[in-house]
Image: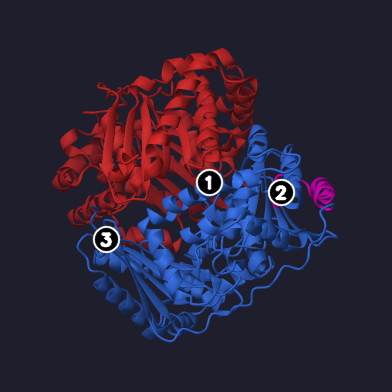
Chain colours: A red, B blue
Amino acid sequence: MTPKRTVLSNGMVLLTSEQRTLPMVSIELLVDAGSAHESAPQAGLANLTAKLLTYGTKRRSAVQINETLDFIGASLETACAQDTASLSMTVLKKDLGTGLELLADVLTQPAFPQPEIDRQKQAIIATIRATEENPGAVAGKAFAAALFPQSPYGRPVEGTEASVKALQQKNLQDFFARYYRPNRSIIAVVGDVSEQEIASLLETALRSWSKGEPSAVATAPVKIGSSKLVRMNKDLTQANIIMGHIGVARGNSDYYAVQVMNYVLGGGGFSSRVMDSIRNERGLAYSVYSFFAAERSHGTFEFVMQTKNETAMEAIRIGNDEIRRMREEPVSDQELNDAKDYLIGSFPLRFDTNRKVASFLAQVEYFKLGLDYPDRYPDLIRSVNGEEVLRVAKQYLHPEMLITVIVGNLKKIAEK
Amino acid sequence: MFWQRGVRYVLTIFFFGVALSNLHAAPVQEFVLDNGLKVLLLEDHKSPAVTFQVWYRVGGRNEKDGKSGLAHFLEHMMFKGTPSTGPEEYSRIIAKNGGRSNAFTSSDMTVYFATMSREKIGIELDLEADRMANALLGEQYFEPEKKVIQEERRLRTEDNPGSALSEVTGAVAFMIHPYRRPVVGWMEDIQRLTRQDLVDFHKLYYAPNNAFIVVVGDFSTDEIMPKIRAAFGKVSRGAEAPKVSVQEPEQQGERRAILKKEAELPFLLLFYHAPNLQNADSFALEVLSVVLAGGRSSRLYHELVYEKRLVRGVDADYSRVSVDPMGFSITAQLLLGIQPANVEREIYGLLEKLKSELITDRELQKSKNQIEAAFIFDQDSIFGQAMKIGYYEVTGGWRQLNAYLDGIRKVTREDIQRVARQYLDADRRTVGTLIPTKGQ
């Protein structure tokens, strides 16, 4: 069914798409309450707040919430990113009433019990440690810190061990009261329910939730890190490499040309240039790709690969060459057309499940793309031509600004 | 170990313990071509896409000692072209037609797939038929691809403490059954594989009578069957593939494996030999895995994560859908400063309780509700549905899917107690422990 958009009386935007094939409903709720809203000494506050939502409300203990959810076989998960916090629920149609009541309860009446705060702090600190075992994540953190110094976008969402330990119940209550507001929220509901039915259920379930301070215009990071080499030693067989720099914001009019350009460079899976030169020709890596991630206020460009320590410098050199070549030579007609054909042709595959549709609708609203976005998308891509690809490569790829992060066995890397 | 797979490129596959519904979806239709190729079709018109999968009944399970990683290596080389398509051209053709494609290898099977629009799916179909019969496995691509696979092993196993532990534990839990070998292969074995190994393996196993096709999504049977017959009908039947009949002898006493590696948190893996879907107890074991670790209210999660705060996360995974019996495993990543021996003791205590006291009616109902809900949620994805049909077909025949929910519903509290006693027994157990070391 064609998606519909409406604004509830409390100011929350509701997007719906009726899908009657399966007796289930998927819900995605975005709140403008990400870690970009916290100060440096309180790093991790937004994340801890989001975590605590399902660990006790004024009427229900954490144990009761868990038991209720599990008994109906539903999932209710919270997550926190830099710009937004999110709640995702999947529930059988027959249990939609129970599910919505729980969702509304955790969203509007969390109690932030002290014992639960202590538990989650310990869990988050363990997560911070566990992340250290993932070399790709270690490199990602180091890259963000180098690119956006003194900015919330340079800090990990979960904070640091010290900052998490220092967070107080009062901080969570205040953060929640200020940022978890219906007029800062988007809810997308996809599945076996009509717009009318869900709108009325939500009006009732969320009637006590009142408007607050509206979302501010997103502010981009002020300070951008310049070219540097960050090396981190770990006893690994591979060097985990990220090269990158600032990218484009989602609203940038060159966004689509940039996506086409990046497809040719490293976004196109087995069709990309770096997959050819680094994986297929030389066998240097299993995984090698690049992407432009776009947020409201800014974006990043990252080129990511892993190769055995001994070939790290060679792979970096080739990566650099490929980035330069994008700026120097026009892409071939075949590369251009293949990229556009893939982006246009595969677009509908992005919504082949209800859950994906729900998350897509929430993003469309968040980035103000309009519900006709899927209809406009093919033309947005089709209109990109070869000159534009070359122009955006020159404009948005900056070999001289690349920050290079290497996590691996530095001794073996240096020997080469 | 057993559930670990080599994948051509990083992708997310839903691995599941539960099966497809006969609730709302149209029934699966089965056809068999003259050359022995089976075709399983399920029309599902909720989104405008079709997923087309070719399943070969060959995986790590079919390899010989010293040749581990062969099935997975062949999967990689299947992308290196045929007389009519160049190396890596397969992926480009699918992509420029708006499709997404990939492949993976597990112990039991090797699967190639693409998801595309209804109008374009014929392209995938022709390409798959072509490479089934005519893959060149070109000599000049062999050495570079070997390096790629070695990088894959480094990325996914050697630098990943959890999967490195799985590998070691698997090699101890199984003594003679090929499930003891990693699907990606041991590094030394990969190094020594030759192109001739691949050619022989391809000839032996890649034949229509050792494969089947699964198609799920927005297509019409009347339209697609003639296309499948035209494309695959001309591939000639192969010799009967050799059967693997190794049976793992019964384990008589606990085994232990310890891995010391640069990591932050200790990790515990308890593996118990257990039967697969060929055994009626498999339904009770499936429910038992949910009682133990399905959701935050489950026994292991509630006690170890929530109440006692010993572990960061805990899971119970039962390999019901496998060709030969695999097992039932419990995994836990420990919180800082917690001793693995403590967690082991706690887990054994919880298991003993399941053996000595019946679970409550509500707990049984809750677990069944979770399985039934997951079962419906899983139908949200055409790819996921195709995977399930394929898994069942490889291991016990796709019709077993239809018996799944009934089997689950019949499980009693007494069954749970009985299978816990019988299979979660210390003598059938292998305990793997990851001990973190500091880097240089």
**Disc 1: host chain:** B
Q: Amino acid at mark 3?
A: Pro
Residue that numbered label 2 is attached to: B135
Q: Residue at x 84, y 53 (%)?
A: B233
Q: Residue at x 40, y 51 (%)?
A: A76
Specify whether B202 is left or right of A258: right
The magenta stretch is B215-233
Q: Residue at x 75, y 59 (%)?
A: B207
Other residues around mark 3 within 10 Å, as few (<14) / some (14–19) / many (≥20) = some
**CB contact under 8 Å: marks 2 and 1:** no
Residue B374 visible from this viewpoint: yes
**Which label lies toward us, 2 or 3?**
2
Image height of B289 relative to A400, above or below: below
Which secondary structure lies at badge 3?
A: strand
Image height of B278 relative to B418, above or below: above
**CB contact under 8 Å: marks 2 and 3:** no
The one of A395 and B284 positioned closer to us in this rendering = A395
Same chain, labels 2 and 1? yes
Q: Which mark is residue B353?
A: none
Q: Amino acid at mark 1?
A: Tyr
Specify whether B277 is left or right of A5: right
Question: Mark 2 or 3 closer to N-term?
Answer: 2
Q: How far apart, in angstroms, are the residues tagged by discs 3 and 1?
A: 28 Å
Q: Which mark is residue B436?
A: 3
Specify whether B147 is left or right of A399: right
The one of A375 and A146 positioned closer to us in this rendering = A146
Same chain, labels 3 and 1? yes
At which x and y percent is residue A66?
A: 36, 60
**Disc 3: host chain:** B
In reply to whether residue B223 is colored magenta, the answer given is yes
